[in-house]
Amino acid sequence: MKQKFDVITSTCVPLPIENVDTDQIIPARFLKATTREESFFGDNLFRDWRYDKDGQPIRDFVLNNPDYKGCILVAGKNFGSGSSREHAAWAIAGYGFRVVISSFFADIHKNNEMNNFVLPVQVSEDFLQELFESIRQNPQMQVEVDLPNQLVTNKATGRSERFEINSYKKHCLMNGLDDIDFLVANKDKIVAWENKR
């Protein structure tokens, strides 16, 4: 869903598991879907970790724990590895996450998240572990993600860390533009450039 980014402050959902690949995010059997409905993919986010073979919620999985809510997913190192399926980003966005924080993202998945208006925030391993500990101590603690200033802040400790983002993607996210929207917004400049050639 196209939403403008500015400053997001939210409680978090912790997923302290490393090497979460795209097949775990959205299993391959859902790639055959003929829909692009956000709710369909969101409902099947982490399907095989979230539900048993009978479709019943697995009580111990974090998305089934009512203590953890919010639009920020805090995930372990190497998030989104594996296949390049964009469906994984669709599922994350469809569930309602607007930000994913990790100490490392697979490149293709990171770009897929941004293309689907989910902000991947890469932090140091030390900062990530501090976030997990703060959430463990108080599931109601909040994190502030300030895209204009490229800062993420653990509101429980007051510690902030700067994150990097491509300037073009930052512009698009802050203005709610996908790649096509950006081109259309610059149509006059493109036409003027072509006329000069």
Image (tube, rainbow, N blue to C red):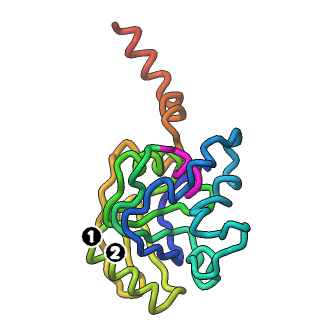
Which residue is more in the foreground, 92 or 19? 19
Residue 185 against residue 42 in the figure, above or below: above
Q: Residue at x 37, y 75 (%)?
A: 153
Q: Position of residue 197 (x, y in %)?
A: 34, 7
Residue 134 against residue 61 in the figure, above or below: below
Q: Position of residue 25 (x, y in %)?
A: 52, 58
| Element class at badge 2 | helix
Which residue is more in the foreground, 142 or 194? 142
Which residue is more in the foreground, 91 or 164? 91
Q: Residue at x 48, y 35 (%)?
A: 179
> Dot 1, how many residues are within 10 Å of its Cα: few (below 14), some (14-19), or many (20+)?
some
- Residue 104 falls left or right of residue 29: left
Dominant SS of magenta comes to: helix
Tell me the residue that label 2 is attached to: 128
* Residue 86 within the segment the image draws in magenta: yes
Q: Are marks 1 and 2 in contact (CB under 8 Å)?
A: yes
Count of marks, rendered view: 2
Amino acid type of the residue tagged 2 in the rendering? Leu
Q: Residue at x 54, y 53 (%)?
A: 4
* Residue 30 within the segment the image draws in magenta: no
Residue 124: image tag:
1
Amino acid type of the residue tagged 1 in the rendering? Ser
| Element class at badge 1 | loop
> Dot 2, how many residues are within 10 Å of its Cα: few (below 14), some (14-19), or many (20+)?
many
